[in-house]
Image: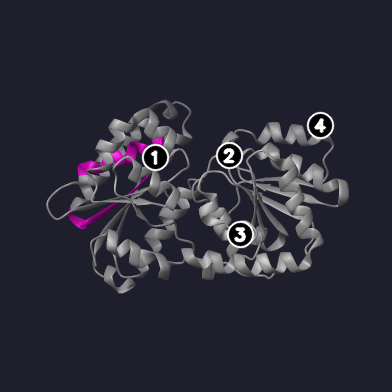
Amino acid sequence: MSEGFAGVGIAVMGPFPPRPGGVSVQCGVLADLLAGSGARVTRLNTDVPRLRAARAGRLALPLGQVASLTRQLRQTRPSWQVLHVHAASWWGFMPAMVGLQGRGRGKRLVISYHGGEAAAFLDRWGALAQAVLRRYDALLALTPTQARLFRGCGLPAQVTPNIVAVDDIPFRLRERIQPHLLWLRQLEPRYRPADALEVLARVQVEHPQATLTMAGGGSLAASLAAESAQRGLRGVDLTGQLSPGEVLRAYDAAGVFLNTSAIDNLPLTLIEASAAGLPVVSTTAGAIPDLITDGENGLLSPVGDTAALAGHVLRLLADQELTARLSQAARGNAARFSWPQVAPLLAQAYGLI
């Protein structure tokens, strides 16, 4: 099915690496895979790194982003037939609005909606958001939960998940694991990183040698370091932002992947960790139950229930058979998000089938 992309001009609009975050990773991966399948790919970057890096420039960043995208659309318009916009809620919806400038004869507009705050955003800006989304030829929801939300607003949505280069992630079967926990998200309130410290504290009651690697940057980095020191927690490593190679090494070194988020949709880190064979312990935030089935390919608990999350970690440390079963099932679960599985869905959305 990938051959259907050959020779087609496709523009991918969204943030691109080195901008941190799952959406930028996804845009980069998608652009690379489309190009590898023979498409003529144009990258329309919603980020303006020069403005973001300058202190005064940050005040002008929103207007700078709109102006930059408008210019990129105008300059590249003759080179593509399909525009694939990656948007989210709040200011992340800006690309959806600017992308409408790409409409015209012979042009097909497709939008993927990222993030876990679609319900709140539609509740606040529903009339405007629905009017914009209806002008796209295809609306792609990452999860069934998100698709039901859009369909409830009368917006036809096709479930088309994120793509993970599963074959590029080394798999290691976990059986008798060490108490090395990995937490990999942005250090922001919506992901409740302080809960990870509480989980570690509870696990260390039975396993004093337990460690926690927290990978990612964000506004809570300093407060988490201070809290860790104040509580006298041992083995906490706040690494900051990691390179792709460092992320793969972090997956390989860990024994359990811990996710404590309160708001989520289809986190790439959970898919990548699953592909690496890490047993996943996560909250049930947002659409995570669309990704992880409790007891089948991971272990789930309600948001904020650190006792239950820690209990899951302790079960894995004590039950070698459970750990091995979840590790093996996790890799199979991640295969659902590989390019061969997602490419036909995108070809349909792009009007190539």
- Which comes before the other along the chain, label 3 or label 1? 1
- Which comes before the other along the chain, label 4 or label 1? 1
In front: label 4 or label 2? 2
- Which comes before the other along the chain, label 3 or label 4? 4
The N terminus, quarter of image: bottom left
Q: Residue at x 34, y 67 (%)?
A: 344
* Residue type at tag 4: Gln
Which label was assigned to residue 48? Answer: 1
* Quarter assignment of residue 232: top right
* Direction left: furthest residue: 105
* Residue type at tag 3: Ala
Taking 38 as reference, is 118 above or below it? above
- Provide the residue designation for mark 4: 230
- Picture coordinates of residue 117, whole percent (x, y): 46, 38
* Residue type at tag 2: Ala
Q: How far is the residue under mark 3 from the one under mark 4?
A: 30 Å
Assign a secondary structure to mark 1.
loop
Which label was assigned to residue 246? Answer: none
- Provide the residue designation for mark 3: 273
Q: Where are the magenta residues, as a range?
A: 78-101
Q: Is residue 85 visible?
A: yes
> Quick one: label 2, few (<14), some, or many (20+) residues within 10 Å?
some
Q: How far is the residue under mark 4 from the one under mark 2?
A: 24 Å
- Which comes before the other along the chain, label 2 or label 1? 1
Q: How far is the residue under mark 4 from the one under mark 1?
A: 38 Å
Q: Is residue 208 visible?
A: no
- Which comes before the other along the chain, label 4 or label 2? 4
> Quick one: label 1, few (<14), some, or many (20+) residues within 10 Å?
some
